[in-house]
């Protein structure tokens, strides 16, 4: 009987009197991938951070390779062989890849830093993992988001860990990069490394994991091999709701009317030949791989990185959008991909965040907006009694709801959403989808960018696919994931009948 | 192109224009005497600038340098006045006190969590109070043997400038080849990331503050050697707090920390020294010198800010861009 | 508009009362302590006529601090205000001379100069992306160099008594106080205006810009123009301070030297966080009074004048350290139990080091 390489025994943890983990036990086997799933607030992040040495458990014990451990600092965990890849990048942009990876343990020769060895060692780790497109001497600031995520993974792996725990590692990765990660994971498995895999992407969990633990409200509600459970069952355990309730249907009375937004041959340095139209009441989904240019298209429509070619028509009128202010004045809203960096002012109150756009772009409407704000916030079920509380203390789901409120208060005609449900719990996701249906009923034209294909398929009236900066042909709502992926990757796939599609 | 290279290109341009202007006055910019003046002008600001660079790299600031300089000049001059062995004692004492001030600065910034601006401003005021109370004017006297250091030169290059450049080289070495140096960059870039990697985030900041005050102390000793006495106002008269920050910034180091180089600062110091010398030679009104300095600072930094780091891949390059 | 001013003033007063008992606001406690110490050491000070003179003395620096507040809260610095004061003082002294009829046109010119300086500071730092520390440092050198050049470094000009009386004089025979200095009236007006502006969308947007300028860009705010206006407010406050200072400081290019540091220190004492995103006008005002009260205490306590700077340095560090420490304490305590992942442990500052990460709960 093989012993678990990492075990938690009845671990409990509270914050400010609220119990976040309650007697959770988990056993990670060497050479296996163990998924950890649950809604946000279920405790999986906390458990991961206890393993990582960021928090200490209040009760219960943790064992690494048979030895009792009680880490007080992340570095202790790393040195003991438990490496963690967090969601937030912990990289220094002005330093090189090698310098980042070896931060704090720079190799020395005669008391001085041995840069050559640092670069060589980094190269060796990367070669082992089949990564040849990043140079150890490049500055991190010159890498793309996906490449930076890979550097984070390399950093964790460079500690020669026996356990690696990953929190949403594929969130920023394109499909071929996800495959790369999967092959790295396979290599690690064969070396006997145990991998703890935290993810909201249930498809991936079923693909990669050998075993899975489901958490709900801080308690372990299911634990076992992946073959022993199905996705719908897992969702029900996580959420207490069947999977069909996920994507609310189109609301009765919604009609698709006139064209609200139309782009003719839009282009700039990142995208080309963009011809797109969105009608009132319609939800158009933009699918595609990370880096295909989807965010660039919406940033161009919103004026953040404007089109240098082509025309934009809004409600039939040619409109020039050279900056976000003009977009907002034209009635466009953009819920950005990165809400912490672009959607929120973290030290300001919930109310101030909700009034952000009105104050910035339509200051004369502030009084009315302040009156309406509490109503809008509560209709989205923002969970807070005190609107003066600083927004940084809210959960991701609630923060996203405040971002949405902020835009609702500007009465937009066109709403663009970029990864609207990324990193938020299931309850909040449903709230976002419901809101989208309500907006469509009111005649708003909606454009949605998403990496979650079920979401794109479940919510869109029409789907377009981006690849390498250009739009591929449109698909109807009957499109399945395979068709979308084909267009997204540009591969020629064989259909069930064996013919080329 | 790195900003350090830009600084030296700018220096080259300034020297060329300066030489022409000076030549128009019938003088030779490149004469031994003139070059020696320029280099002399670089030594003091260079020493302070080196220290300030370290502090700014660690994302802090040091406004106490002028007071440390004055204090150091007085301690040195008074201790040395009996000559002989007391010269060495004077230097050591002055440096010890300077280091102590740096330690206090570092501790206030890291342990009391006070912004460098406020912390060093406060410490500077504390020293100022002591100076105002204890000294009514200059004091002490520097023996002839030591005054030589302030004035000796090898050809056109003063010994003090060589010493300053040697210190620059040593600090460059520290920054690139030691863990401490790497950690100064790291903590200045992001204290949070550094902490997660197990770095003690206080140590690099404290070290940079101690080294900064030490270099200010050295500058004070140098000034004492040149003046022959110590003076309670020598640091403030020269405006070394803001000028050293200006040299660092003109040299391409970012105020936000984590990015920059010692050689850039030296280049910035050189630019200011050349400007100073040229403006004197063409008999530019001394008050207008400040106007020129102010403009140079803003223009230089504006040029660096134009260069943004492009992280996105350009797929459809604009024609004619 | 008047009703709105009264409303926001009322709100501000109510908020200050709540704030005095809030451990985060060390400045109000310190101020009360210092005033109490002053009254103890010199009971005559509590007399209305004496006290009002104290307020008159503080007025210029208090106005300057409130102006600096707007710049600091947006995440910037304005180091040029001291030099600008010198410029304004010299302009007033020389252009008005003994001819009082020139007062109004020269006043207009002074405000115009102030606005232009603020405009340049704002535009260069926002549009050319030069850090405001550097821009205003450069502006300070340019202005000082210019004013010393023009005056040759010595006092010059002797402004008419009428103009002087703005800073020196006031309404005679005023109930309770005897003399109600113009300076105090100006201070009250400026305080009301500043409070009002800070609660308007402009003010709120400014604070949010200090918190996260990128979010404001994506919200359609005109970040460059909002920040520039903050610099213009700061320069205008320097102009007003200069006008008052002509009254009792004489016309010398050294007037105002070091005032930018005093204003920044006062604002920080009052709860403004360097880097932006936090603070309010009344706190800045209290900070200015606290500093001045501190000087007065040292005066009455017969502390040798040469040691005053040292004491000032210690108190400044102590006060800022205290509020920094208690602010961190509040943050840890105030961590929402609903989402411990954000507030606790590694990121007590609430924001990840890099902004390119995928968002998480």
Image: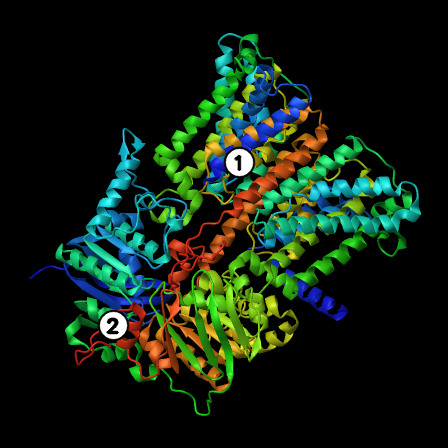
Q: Secondary structure at mark 1?
A: helix
Does residue C326 lie above or below A22 as drawn? above
x, y percentage for residue C132?
60, 47
Which residue is identified by label 1? B248
Same-chain status of marks 1 and 2 = no
Q: Which mark is residue C215?
A: none
The residue depicted at 59 percent of the width and 33 percent of the height is B243
Classify the position of the N terminus of chain B by image quarter: top left
x, y (%) of residue C115? 73, 51
> Which residue is at the front of the view, A471 or A404?
A471
Rendered view: A458 above or below C79: below
> Residue B103, can we see it?
no
Q: Which residue lies most toward the front here?
A: B320
Q: Residues within 10 Å of mark 1 (few under 14, many from 20)?
A: many
Residue A137 located left or right of residue C79: left
| Front residue of this view, candidates A83 and C47 | A83
């Amino acid at each position: 009987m093989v012993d678990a390489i990492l075990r938690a025994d009845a671990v409990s943890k509270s914050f400010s009197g609220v119990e976040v983990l309650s007697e959770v036990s988990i056993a990670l086997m060497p050479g296996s991938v163990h998924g950890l799933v649950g809604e946000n607030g279920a405790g999986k992040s906390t458990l991961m951070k206890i393993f990582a040495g960021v928090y200490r458990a209040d009760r219960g014990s943790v064992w690494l390779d048979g030895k009792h451990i009680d880490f007080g600092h992340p570095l202790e965990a790393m040195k003991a062989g438990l490496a963690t890849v967090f969601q937030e990048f912990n990289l220094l942009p002005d330093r090189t890849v090698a310098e980042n990876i070896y931060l704090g343990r720079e190799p020395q020769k005669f008391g001085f830093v041995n840069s050559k060895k640092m670069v060589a060692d980094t190269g060796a780790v990367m070669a082992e993992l089949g990564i040849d497109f990043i140079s150890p001497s490049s500055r991190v600031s010159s890498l793309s988001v996906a490449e930076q995520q890979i550097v984070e993974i390399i950093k964790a792996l460079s500690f020669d860990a026996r356990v690696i725990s990953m929190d949403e590692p594929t969130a920023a990765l394109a499909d071929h990069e996800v495959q790369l990660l999967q092959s790295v994971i396979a290599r690690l498995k064969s070396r006997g490394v145990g991998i703890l895999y935290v993810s909201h992407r249930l498809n991936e969990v079923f693909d990669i994991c050998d075993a899975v633990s489901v958490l709900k409200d801080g308690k372990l509600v299911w634990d076992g091999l992946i073959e022993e459970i199905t996705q719908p069952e897992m969702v029900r355990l996580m959420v207490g709701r069947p999977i069909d309730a996920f994507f609310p249907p189109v609301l009765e009375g919604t009609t698709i009317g006139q064209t609200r937004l139309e782009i003719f041959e839009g282009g700039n340095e990142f995208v080309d030949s963009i011809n797109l139209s969105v009608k009132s009441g319609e939800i158009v989904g933009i699918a595609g791989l990370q880096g295909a240019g989807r965010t660039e298209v919406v940033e161009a429509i919103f004026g953040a990185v404007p089109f240098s070619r082509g025309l934009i028509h809004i409600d039939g009128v040619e409109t020039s959008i050279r900056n976000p202010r003009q977009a907002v004045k034209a009635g466009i809203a953009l819920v950005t991909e990165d809400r912490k960096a672009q959607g929120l002012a973290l030290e300001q109150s919930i109310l101030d965040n909700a009034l952000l756009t009105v104050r910035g772009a339509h200051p004369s409407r502030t009084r009315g907006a302040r009156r309406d704000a509490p109503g809008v916030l509560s209709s989205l079920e923002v969970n807070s009694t005190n609107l003066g509380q600083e927004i940084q203390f809210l959960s991701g789901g609630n923060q996203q709801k405040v971002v949405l409120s902020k835009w609702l208060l500007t009465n937009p005609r066109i709403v663009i959403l970029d990864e609207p449900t990324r990193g938020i719990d299931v309850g909040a996701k449903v709230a976002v989808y419901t809101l989208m249906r309500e907006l469509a009923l009111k005649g708003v034209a909606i454009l949605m960018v998403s990496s979650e294909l079920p979401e794109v398929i479940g919510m869109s009236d029409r789907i377009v696919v981006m690849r390498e900066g250009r739009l591929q042909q449109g698909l109807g709502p009957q499109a399945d994931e395979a068709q979308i992926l084909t267009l997204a990757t540009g591969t020629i796939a064989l259909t069930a009948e064996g013919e080329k599609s | 192109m790195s900003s350090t290279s830009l600084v030296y290109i700018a220096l080259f341009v300034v020297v060329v224009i300066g030489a022409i202007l000076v030549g128009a006055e019938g003088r030779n910019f490149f004469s031994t005497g003139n070059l020696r003046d320029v280099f002399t002008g670089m030594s003091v600001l260079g020493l302070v600038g080196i220290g300030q660079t370290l502090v700014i790299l660690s994302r802090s600031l040091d406004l106490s340098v002028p007071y440390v300089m004055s204090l150091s000049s007085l301690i040195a001059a008074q201790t040395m006045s009996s000559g002989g062995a007391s010269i060495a004692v004077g230097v050591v004492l002055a440096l010890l006190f300077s280091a102590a001030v740096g330690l206090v600065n570092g501790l206030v910034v890291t342990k009391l969590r006070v912004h460098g601006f406020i912390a060093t401003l406060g410490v500077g005021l504390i020293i100022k109070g002591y100076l105002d109370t204890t000294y009514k004017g200059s004091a002490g006297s520097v023996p002839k043997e030591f005054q030589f250091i302030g004035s000796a030169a090898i050809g056109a290059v003063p010994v003090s400038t060589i010493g300053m450049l040697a210190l620059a080289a040593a600090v460059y070495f520290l920054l690139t080849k030691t863990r401490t140096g790497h950690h100064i960059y790291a903590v200045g870039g992001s204290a949070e990331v550094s902490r997660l990697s197990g770095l003690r985030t206080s140590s690099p900041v404290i070290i940079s503050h101690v080294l900064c005050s030490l270099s200010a102390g050295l500058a004070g000793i140098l000034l004492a050697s040149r003046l022959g006495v110590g003076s309670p106002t020598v640091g403030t008269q020269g405006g070394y707090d803001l000028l050293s920050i200006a040299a660092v910034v003109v040299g391409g180091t970012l105020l936000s920390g984590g990015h920059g180089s010692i050689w850039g600062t030296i280049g910035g110091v050189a630019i200011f020294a050349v400007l100073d010398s040229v403006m004197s030679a063409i008999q530019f009104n001394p008050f207008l010198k400040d106007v020129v300095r102010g403009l140079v600072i803003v223009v230089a930094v504006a040029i660096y800010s134009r260069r943004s780091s492009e992280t996105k891949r350009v797929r459809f390059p604009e024609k004619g861009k | 508009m008047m009703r709105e001013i009264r409303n926001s003033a009322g709100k501000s007063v109510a908020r200050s009362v709540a704030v005095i008992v809030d451990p985060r606001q060390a400045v109000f406690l310190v101020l009360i302590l210092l005033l109490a110490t002053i009254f103890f050491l010199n009971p005559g000070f509590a007399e209305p006529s004496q006290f009002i003179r104290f307020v008159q003395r503080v007025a210029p620096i208090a106005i300057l601090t409130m102006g600096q507040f707007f710049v600091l809260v947006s995440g910037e610095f304005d180091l040029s205000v001291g030099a600008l004061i010198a410029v304004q003082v010299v302009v007033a002294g020389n252009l008005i001379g003994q001819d009082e009829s020139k007062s109004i046109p020269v006043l207009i010119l002074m405000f115009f100069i102030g606005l232009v300086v603020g405009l340049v500071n704002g535009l260069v730092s926002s549009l050319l992306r030069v850090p405001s520390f550097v821009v205003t440092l450069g502006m300070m050198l340019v202005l000082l160099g210019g004013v010393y050049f023009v005056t040759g470094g010595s006092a010059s000009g002797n402004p008419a008594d009428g103009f002087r009386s703005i800073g020196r004089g006031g309404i005679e025979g005023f109930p309770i106080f005897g003399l109600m200095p113009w300076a105090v009236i100006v201070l009250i007006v400026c305080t009301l205006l500043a409070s009002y502006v800070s609660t308007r969308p402009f003010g709120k947007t400014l604070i949010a810009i200090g918190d996260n300028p990128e979010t404001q860009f994506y919200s359609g705010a005109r970040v460059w123009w909002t920040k520039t206006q903050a610099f213009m407010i700061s320069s205008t406050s320097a102009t007003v301070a200069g006008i008052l200072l002509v009254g009792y400081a004489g016309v010398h290019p050294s007037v105002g030297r070091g005032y930018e540091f005093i204003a920044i220190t006062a604002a920080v004492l009052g709860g403004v966080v360097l880097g932006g995103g936090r603070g309010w006008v009344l706190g800045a005002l209290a900070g200015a009074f606290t500093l001045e009260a501190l000087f007065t205490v040292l005066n009455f306590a017969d502390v040798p004048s040469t040691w005053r700077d040292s004491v000032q340095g210690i108190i400044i560090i102590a006060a800022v350290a205290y509020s920094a420490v208690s602010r961190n304490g509040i943050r840890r305590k105030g961590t929402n139990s609903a989402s411990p992942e954000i507030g606790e442990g590694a990121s007590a500052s609430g924001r990840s080091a890099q902004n390119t990460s995928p968002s998480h709960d």
